[in-house]
Image (cartoon, rainbow, N blue to C red):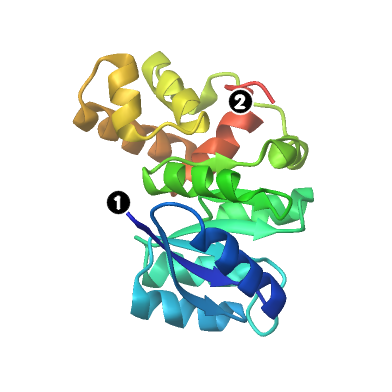
């Protein structure tokens, strides 16, 4: 299916360049572009794209706050951060706000497409270049019992961190997708997470997957 994308970046040349690159990719439609976070939220609520490619540093409303507002107003719209910033604080703030993916602007068109496809399938996409920042920011020692997660929940969590969707996890573990959803809901409740991006951060923090 075609991925409908909204671009959010305060630099016109970046928006136009991204629109050009994405327009050359198969099954991608750029449905709009915003120059700041506030405009991105309003356009996303109206246009309901599948993905918002969100810069972090924008005037009036930055990308983190825009992501937080979208989580409340249009939770079905997924946010993939695309930014030049890959420091600890930026990565964690974006994930905590509800971003499902985090890429640097060094990513090429195929990388962006792969990340968007993964996120649309309810997966998460972290640029390898920023994964170690998650570990650095989440430096507290892991709880010994992983907050009471069962071995199966730990297994599901590791696969979520690997970017697999519920359907892919079900196929990998030879269980139903409904069972996977149940495991996801239970493990999120135990770790105090709201979404899969926070589950990924937890998995790296607690060394459930290698950094």
- Residue occupied by mark 1: 1
Instruction: Say which quadrant the C terminus sits in.
Output: top right
Residue plotted at (35% across, 25% down)? 169
Q: Is residue 84 left or right of residue 186?
A: right
How far separated are the C-alphas under marks 2 and 1?
Answer: 41 Å
Question: Is residue 11 visible to the viewer in this orientation of the structure?
Answer: no
Taking the image as shown, residue 105 lies to the left or right of residue 113, namely right
- Observer able to see residue 84: yes
Residue 93 position in % (x across, y down): 65, 56
Secondary structure type for disc 2:
loop
Q: Which of pointers 2 and 1 lies earlier in the amino acid sequence?
A: 1
Residue 34 x %, y %: 56, 79
20 sits left or right of 26 in the view: right
| Label 1 Cα crowd, 10 Å radius (few <14 / some 14-19 / many 20+) | few
Q: Nearer the viewer, mark 2 or mark 1?
A: 1
Q: Residue furthest front?
A: 24
Nearest the eye: 48 or 66:
48
Of 125 and 3, nearer the camera is: 3
Considering only vertical position in the picture, is 16 above or below 167? Answer: below
Residue drawn at point x = 53 percent, y = 19 percent: 145
> In the structure shown, which secondary structural element does the residue marked by tag 1 occupy?
loop
- Residue 143, which numbered label? 2
Q: Quadrant of residue 105?
A: bottom right
């Amino acid at each position: 299916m075609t991925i409908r994308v909204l671009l959010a970046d305060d630099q016109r040349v970046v928006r136009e360049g991204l629109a050009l690159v994405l327009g050359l990719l198969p099954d991608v439609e750029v449905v709009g572009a915003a120059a700041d976070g506030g405009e991105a939220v309003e356009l996303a609520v109206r246009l309901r794209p599948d993905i918002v490619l969100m810069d972090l540093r924008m005037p009036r409303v930055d990308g983190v706050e825009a992501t937080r507002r979208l989580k409340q107003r249009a939770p079905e719209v997924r946010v993939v951060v695309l930014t030049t910033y890959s420091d600890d604080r930026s990565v964690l703030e974006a994930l905590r706000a509800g971003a499902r993916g985090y890429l640097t602007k060094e990513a090429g068109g195929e990388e962006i497409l792969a990340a968007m496809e993964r996120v649309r399938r309810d997966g998460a996409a972290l640029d390898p270049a920023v994964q170690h920042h998650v570990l650095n920011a989440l430096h507290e020692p892991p709880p010994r019992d992983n907050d009471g997660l069962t071995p199966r929940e730990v297994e599901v969590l590791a696969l979520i961190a690997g970017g697999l969707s519920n359907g892919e996890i079900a196929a990998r573990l030879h269980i139903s997708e409904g069972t996977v959803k149940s495991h996801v809901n239970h493990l999120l409740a135990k770790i105090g997470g709201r979404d899969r991006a926070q589950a990924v951060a937890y998995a790296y923090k607690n060394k459930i997957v290698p950094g």
